[in-house]
Amino acid sequence: MTINPGELSPDDWQRICAALRYLGRDLHHRSFAVTDQRRELLWQEMDHCLALADRLAAALPAEQDPALE
């Protein structure tokens, strides 16, 4: 299944960013119960999730403040 990025609403993109950030926090939480080697892998994946969320959020159009309309 292929989704054209233009088919997603700004709310959809915000949900994706929020889900990536949640996943990053969950990976960090899980990293305390594993070996040092596994922890490094989880932290790398956490960093990738958070970086992608930041990149997507930066590409979203800024929401307008309703007070300015």
Image (cartoon, grey):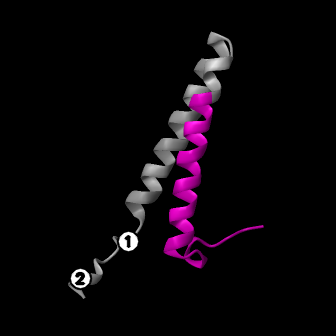
Q: Residue at x 57, y 46 (%)?
A: 22
Q: Nearer the viewer, mark 1 or mark 2?
A: 2
19 relative to 15, above or below: above
Q: For residue 35, which quarter of the picture? A: top right
Q: Residue at x 62, y 11 (%)?
A: 36
Q: Tell me: 61 left or right of 66.
A: right
Q: Secondary structure at mark 1?
A: loop
Q: Which residue is mark 1?
A: 61
Q: Which residues are magenta?
A: 1-29
Q: Name the mark on residue 67.
A: 2
| Dot placed on the residue nearer the N-terminal end, 1 or 2 | 1
37 relative to 9, above or below: above
54 relative to 39, above or below: below
* Neighbours of disc 1 within 10 Å: few (<14), some (14-19), many (20+): few
Q: For residue 1, which quarter of the picture? A: bottom right
Residue 21 picture location, percent across and down: 53, 47
Return the residue found at the far right: 1
CB contact under 8 Å: marks 1 and 2: no
Residue 5 picture location, percent across and down: 57, 71
26 relative to 34, above or below: below
